[in-house]
């Protein structure tokens, strides 16, 4: 019996994509990476402007945006994948979007989240609690959480051990696993840059 088709997910904090030049660079980067799913954070795109983002081969796009140029996340699914979305949940502030459905006949639950600076621990605890009914063993959580989960996740600044403990506790309660850290136990975070910014490449799987 043949195995299930491989699914690849990439995630990037783009730190704004209102510039046409930057949108073209991001589109080219996505085409080169050629993922099944692409998750972007901090798009800074207003609801009325999201139509400006058109990437050939990724026509299935799901946005969480506001009327202001702040926050914003998007999930793009390759046209090569057979996706059927049954449920969409969005944060009114454009900080997360959740999709549930099937991808190539396999159940999937995907959350793309951006946790604002300075309030990241509180935000994560509130939003993950809010979404707990939708989180199951098919859930994949990606994004920019702005929150280290261990001493290895932030090399240049001191971490708040209490906050780290609290966030890890809720992740454990929801049975979410930091898959990158599980595979790379003693390594520093991987950072991917796109000329104008960078982001941690992290994934959390239920």
Image (tube, rainbow, N blue to C red):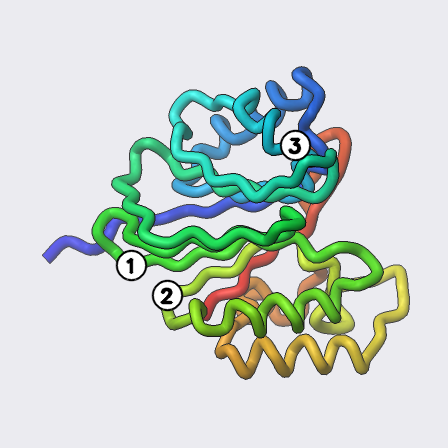
Within 10 Å of the Cα at label 1, are there few (<14), some (14-19), or many (20+) other Cα atoms? some
Pointers 2 and 1 in contact (C-beta within 8 Å)? yes
Q: Which mark is residue 45?
A: 3
| Percent position of residue 184, x then y | 59, 65
Q: Can you see residue 16? A: yes
Q: What residue sits 74% from the left and 58% below the top?
A: 146
**Would you name the residue on which mark 1 appears?**
107
| Percent position of residue 194, x then y | 69, 33
User: Would you say 103 lies left or right of 94 here?
Assistant: left
User: Would you say 36 lies left or right of 46 here?
Assistant: left
List the single residue furthest toward the top. Answer: 21
Q: What residue sits 64% from the left and 44% below the top?
A: 41
Query: Element type at marker 1?
Result: strand
- Camera-side residue of 205 and 1: 205
Distance (Cα) linking label 2 and label 3: 29 Å
Q: Earlier in the sequence, mark 1 or mark 3?
A: 3
When the figure is inspected, residue 204 is found, relative to residue 65, above or below; the finding is: below
Q: Earlier in the sequence, mark 2 or mark 1?
A: 1
Within 10 Å of the Cα at label 3, are there few (<14), some (14-19), or many (20+) other Cα atoms? many
Distance (Cα) linking label 1 and label 3: 29 Å
Q: What residue sits 20% from the left and 55% below the top?
A: 3
Q: What residue sits 84% from the left and 71% below the top?
A: 159
Q: Which mark is residue 13?
A: none
Pointers 1 and 3 in contact (C-beta within 8 Å)? no
- Camera-side residue of 68 and 164: 68
Query: Element type at marker 2?
Result: loop
**Would you name the residue on which mark 2 appears?**
138
Distance (Cα) linking label 2 and label 1: 7 Å
| Percent position of residue 147, x then y | 74, 64
Q: Nearer the viewer, mark 1 or mark 3?
A: 3
């Amino acid at each position: 019996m043949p195995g299930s088709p491989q699914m690849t997910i990439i995630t990037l904090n783009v730190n704004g994509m209102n510039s046409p030049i930057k949108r073209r660079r991001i589109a080219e980067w996505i085409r080169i990476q050629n993922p099944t799913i692409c998750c972007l954070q901090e798009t800074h795109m207003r609801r009325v402007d999201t139509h400006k983002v058109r990437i050939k081969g990724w026509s299935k796009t799901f946005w969480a945006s506001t009327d202001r140029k702040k926050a914003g996340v998007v999930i793009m699914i390759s046209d090569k994948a057979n996706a059927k979305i049954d449920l969409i949940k969005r944060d009114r502030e454009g900080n997360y979007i959740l999709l549930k459905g099937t991808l190539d006949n396999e159940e999937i639950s995907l959350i793309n989240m951006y946790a604002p600076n300075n309030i990241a621990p509180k935000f994560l605890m509130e939003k993950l609690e809010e979404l707990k009914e939708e989180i199951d063993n098919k859930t994949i959580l990606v994004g920019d959480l702005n929150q280290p989960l261990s001493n290895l996740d932030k090399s240049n600044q001191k971490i708040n051990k209490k906050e780290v403990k609290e966030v890890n506790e809720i992740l454990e309660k929801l049975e979410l696993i930091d898959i990158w850290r599980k595979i790379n136990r003693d390594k520093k975070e991987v950072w991917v840059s796109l000329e104008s910014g960078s982001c941690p490449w992290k994934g959390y799987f239920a």
